[in-house]
Amino acid sequence: MSILKWLFGGKSAAAEAPQASVEHEGYTITPTPISEGGQYRLCGVISKNIDGELREHRLIRADVLPTINEANEFTIRKAKQAIKEQGDRIFST
């Protein structure tokens, strides 16, 4: 990384790496934050194998957070909430 990028907030590729998937009550939650204007939009994928078929639901919210780590944590929290409230119905929309 150049000295100018470092001085003015440039980030390395390692700092931009998404968090690994998390298992929760039979579901897999994979944070996939979207970089927007120096912040990160909450985004992730909730997936589950149902009757041998992998079903996926993409969770995208209006929330933006200043760091990728916060976006990852908030995505997991919101995905768990969606699973608790909707269960497998999350895949029917």
Image (spheres, rainbow, N blue to C red):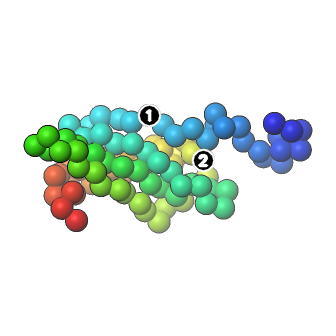
Choose the circle earlier in sequence order: 1 or 2: 1
From the viewer's perspective, tell me whether residue 34 is left or right of residue 37.
left
Percent across and percent down for residue 15 are 64, 37
Q: Which mark is residue 20?
A: 1
Identify the residue shown where x is 52% and y is 40%: 18
Q: Which residue is mark 2?
A: 67
Quadrant housing the N terminus:
top right
**Residue 86 to residue 29: above or below:** below
Identify the residue shown where x is 29% and y is 34%: 23
Element carrying mark 1: loop
Label 2 sits on what residue type? Thr
Task: For marks 1 and 2, give the CA distance.
Answer: 16 Å
Question: Along the line of sight, which residue is nearer the eye, 28 or 54?
Answer: 54
From the viewer's perspective, tell me whether residue 71 is left or right of residue 84.
right
Label 1 sits on what residue type? Ala
Percent across and percent down for residue 91 are 21, 57
Quadrant housing the C terminus:
bottom left
Question: Along the line of sight, which residue is nearer the eye, 13 or 42?
Answer: 13
Percent across and percent down for residue 69 are 54, 41
